[in-house]
Amino acid sequence: MSVVFEKAPLWRRTLPLFQGFDIPLALAVIMLAFAGLLTMYSSGYDHGTRFLDHGRNMLLAASIMFVVAQVPPQRLMLAAVPLYTLGVALLIAVALFGITKKGAQRWVNLGVVIQPSEILKIAMPLMLAWWFQRREGQLRSLDFVVAGLLLLLPVGLIMKQPDLGTSLLVLAAGLAVIFFAGLSWKLILPPVLLALVGIGLVVAFEPQLCADGVRWVVLHDYQQQRICTLLDPRKDPLGKGFHIIQGMIAIGSGGLTGKGFMQGTQTHLEFIPERTTDFIFAAFSEEFGLVGNLLLIGSFIFLILRGLFIAADAPTLFSRLLAGAVTTIFFTYSFVNIGMVSGILPVVGVPLPFISYGGTAMVTLGMALGILMSVSKARRPSQS
């Protein structure tokens, strides 16, 4: 008597791969991705294959997210030291013999031209989460000093390139891990207060500090110009202040409900610079108005709150710190981009997650989402 075993259908065999995925997080990302495709179609209609490339980048990010989500946090922890070491080594290689484009030395040719600073967006929180996991239960002040040095090394190398936007993202992700690990408020408040005093002094003495011929020792010339332009973009409305002024005009002209899909005059008459990348929020605001902005920002807030919930619900210190830092990356991306387009922050090269065009940033976001999904799947059954 022979026994015949029926082969399970493909959908039943692949179903376990999708079990445990965080549905609320996925829904928030789908809403943002839809908004990104809609805006890219409008703002990039005359940019050749921009819309199709954006869709391809999203599919690539989704594939990376799916793969990373299958890796348990314990396995991710094994990659922390090698990935961090590789990233720092490549940053040193950039400093020694990197490729310079538009005055910035950010790339290195290893057969393929890569930008090593992107690796640190994920490697930095991985490394610090690994460090604090190893010190769990015996944390001392010296451990936070070591974590600070591990953070400042790559951040310093990235700022030297110079790349203020990426260094800000890496710094934010690293500081998030250190903060969630239990850094005392006594050590947090002094630098925060010092920064606020510094901002107040710059605003108060802006005419003297931004006068011709005055140079700030701690910043590059272009960084100083961005701050001065933020304080008064009308000083150079057709030059350095053009980006901020046109962004604010587009946001204001959208009104309550916007001018309508494909109807943005600032966008389609090409007044908005970088309208498919860094300033795409201005194009979105013009066509969908305040109502669209509230829905978009609400989706980002929901994604960030969901990420923090996953972090709080994680079973180990490593996964809690990693999920919290990854969520901080999404917050920093969205807050800085919307802030600079709205004229409340200096213009830096930070894209709007899932909305702006860009392959490298989309890959990083896909990895970050995969990490959150991995941590969510690893939660104890009683907490699911």
Image (tube, rainbow, N blue to C red):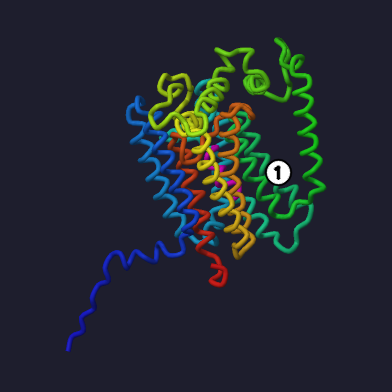
Q: Is residue 122 magenta?
A: yes
Overall secondary structure of the magenta section: helix
Q: Position of residue 274 (x, y in %)?
A: 47, 25
Farthest-out residue, front: 256
- Say which residue appears at 45% left-offset and 46% top-offset: 31
Percent of width and height locating residue 84? 58, 46
Q: Residue at x 74, y 15 (%)?
A: 207
Q: Nearer the viewer, residue 217 or 340?
A: 340
Q: Secondary structure at mark 1?
A: helix
In the picture as drawn, the residue positioned furthest to the top comes out as 212
Q: Nearer the viewer, residue 256 or 75?
A: 256
Q: Quadrant of residue 113?
A: top left
Q: Is residue 110 left or right of residue 1?
A: right
Using the image, determine if residue 319 lies above or below residue 240: below
Residue 108 seen in render: no
Which quadrant would the N terminus be assigned to in this image? Answer: bottom left
Residue 14 rendering spot, x and y as whole percentages:
34, 64
Is residue 293 highlighted in magenta? no
Residue 306: percent from left, percent from top: 56, 54
Q: Is residue 357 visible?
A: yes
Give the residue at mark 1: 149
Which image quadrant for residue 150?
A: top right
Position of 228 compared to 107: left or right? right
For residue 237, above or below residue 327: above
| Residue drawn at the location 55% of the way across and 17% of the way down | 242
Outermost left residue: 1
Amino acid at circle 1: Leu
Residue extent of the magenta highlight: 117-125
- Kindly identify the residue that appears in the image at 72 percent across and 48 percent down: 146
> Relative to residue 138, is residue 83 depicted above or below?
above
Query: 237 or 212, which is in the foreground?
Result: 237
